[in-house]
Image: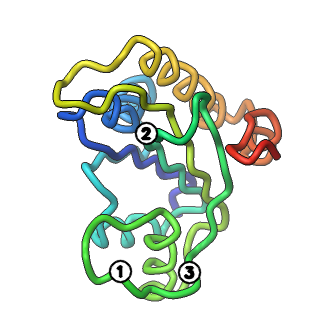
Amino acid sequence: MTTTIVIGYGNTLRRDDGAGVAAAERLARDFPGANVRTAQELHPELAEQLASCALAVFLDASVRTTNVCVTRVFPASSTHGAEGHALSPAGLLALCSALYGHAPEEAILVEIPAFECGFGETMSAETARMVDRAVHIISELLQGVTTPEIILYLVPSPSGN
């Protein structure tokens, strides 16, 4: 069983919205043996790859925060809406569980602040700095320096918990 999967997603043609993809690409470069995937959006086909993992890390841009936020993700209560594309992490975990009988034991969402989401391929300087922070956090996780529980404790969640 693969231990960890990292999935970075977003639209790289909408400036900061590509932050999750940028972070995942850096992690793939820094950890060539890691199971890192990128996508424009979360789609049902990713459920098969999640099924063999103990930990799932989702990387995405967010306009609702001004700092890197890490939150625990649980499978949604149903797979309603999972027949289309553009799933949420919770929806993808629910689909994985429904199709394969289980989902990763632990899943976290790393939200990277997005400030400029107009058309373009260049991230804002502030989001680029936040990508650096997210990559550092997940690098420590991939190296075994820290655990998901420690990350959840150290990085403020959007609700301030």
Which of pointers 3 and 1 indicates the residue nearer the eye? 1
Q: CA distance from mark 2 to mark 1?
A: 21 Å
Q: Does dot 1 land on a helix, a strand or a loop?
A: loop
Instruction: Pick the residue in front: 95 or 103.
Output: 95
Residue assigned mark 3: 102
| Nearer-N-terminus badge (2/1) | 2
Horizontal and vertical percent position of residue 92: 43, 70
Above or below 128: residue 155:
below
Name the kind of residue labelled 3 in the image.
Answer: His
Left-right relation of 44 to 57: left
Which residue is the extreme one toward the top?
Answer: 125
Camera-side mark, 3 or 2: 2
Relative side of 72 to 24, left or right: right
Task: Using the image, determine if residue 131 lies above or below residue 105.
Answer: above
Percent x, y of residue 2: 51, 57
- Near mark 2 (Cα within 10 A), the count class, few <14, some 14-19 or many ≥20, is many
Earlier-in-chain disc, 3 versus 2:
2
The image shows residue 108, relative to residue 86, as above or below, that is above
Which residue is painted at 25% across and 77% down in the image? 84
Q: Secondary structure at mark 3?
A: loop
Q: Which residue is mark 2?
A: 61
The 10 Å Cα crowd at callout 3, few under 14, some 14 to 19, many 20 or more, is some
The residue depicted at 27 percent of the width and 28 percent of the height is 15
Q: Pointer 3 and pointer 2: residues touching (CB < 8 Å)? A: no
Q: Amino acid at mark 2?
A: Ala
**How packed is label 1: few (under 14 Cα within 10 Å), some, or many (20 or more)?**
some
Q: What residue is pinned by disc 1?
A: 82
